[in-house]
Amino acid sequence: MTTLVTGSRGKVGSALVTLLHRQGLPVRAGSASPGDLTFPADVETVRCALDDPSTFPAALDSVASVFLYAEPAHSDTFVAQAHAAGVEHIVLLSSSAVMSPDAADDPIAASHLQVEQALAAGPVEATVLRPGAFAGNALQWAGALRSTGTVDLPYPQSHGDPIHEDDVARVAAAVLTGQAPRGGTHHLTGPQSITFAEQIGTLARAAGRTASVDIRTVTREEWLGSVSAFLPGEFARALLDYWASTDGSPAVLTRTVEELTGRPARTFAEWAEEHADAFRAEQTA
């Protein structure tokens, strides 16, 4: 009863492969670049590029369940081929962004919504996981905290519900192994609503910074300019709109992680302690 984990180079996918392997369960790690994977030698790896349907048949051969990233390009084809291969259950990594009333018009939410709809219309039983922001998104501030100690933010008081990627993997593992009921849709959050400014303060403390950390409030236009080289404009503007909507507004939290795994979700402070080295100030000669 092999489980195919797509996106196995990602934080959630790699954590899930490790969890299933440690339980002695057959798992196949799928990736567009399987040669870059670093799992133990007895973990089977396969090329599975969700934007390339020609990779689907080999990846799905003799697979009973799938952990699926929300790549919409060929989601209908993937679901159809999964069914033909005998897959009985798909766990989708979606996003809480699809819960927005204008999700279909939001470039971030729309891609996840399209895959959810493909699964809903298909013949394979599906469980949908909708996490909010990953705690690992904080790594975007690592360079600034290491070098200047100044972080530019358009909405420092925007609230989020950062969830530890390992907690998402734990939920997926519980559903895939029958420790939690399969089917349905689950909204996953971290255990606290915390602003960007509070996250940065938490990171600074975890990294043992003695020098002050400054947060500089910048305009939307300034922030757009700073990310234009690596983030498409439509996605950047969608993020800005979301942050504006949560500015000073605490996030709605759930206890779904604990309900499905039996263990509370980890705090952002715990994630920060685990990744403190990424945020330590650079030493000068």
Image (spheres, rainbow, N blue to C red):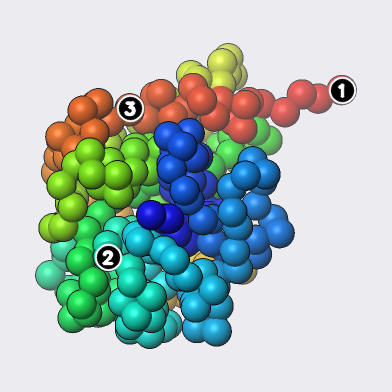
Relative to residue 56, is residue 255 depicted above or below?
Answer: above
Q: Which residue is mark 3?
A: 267
Q: Position of residue 199 (x, y in %)?
A: 39, 33
Q: Quadrant of residue 45?
A: bottom right
Please name the residue that numbered disc 1 is placed on: 285
- In percent of width and height, residue 148 lies at 65, 35
Q: Quadrant of residue 253?
A: top left
Q: Check disc 2: other Cα within 10 Å, few if <14, some if 14-19, many if 20+.
A: some
Quadrant (top left/top right/bottom left/bottom right) for the C terminus: top right
1 or 2: mark nearer the eye: 2
User: Which mark lies nearer to you, 3 or 2?
Assistant: 2
- Among numbered discs 1 and 3, the one appearing first in the sequence: 3
Instruction: Report x, y in % for residue 27.
Output: 48, 51
Task: Say what amino acid the circle numbered 2 marks.
Answer: Glu
Residue on which the image places disc 2: 88
Q: Could you tell me how far apart the alpha carbons at marks 1 and 3 are, in whole angstroms?
A: 35 Å
Q: Amino acid at mark 1?
A: Ala
Question: Which three-letter amino acid code belongs to the residue tagged 3?
Answer: Thr
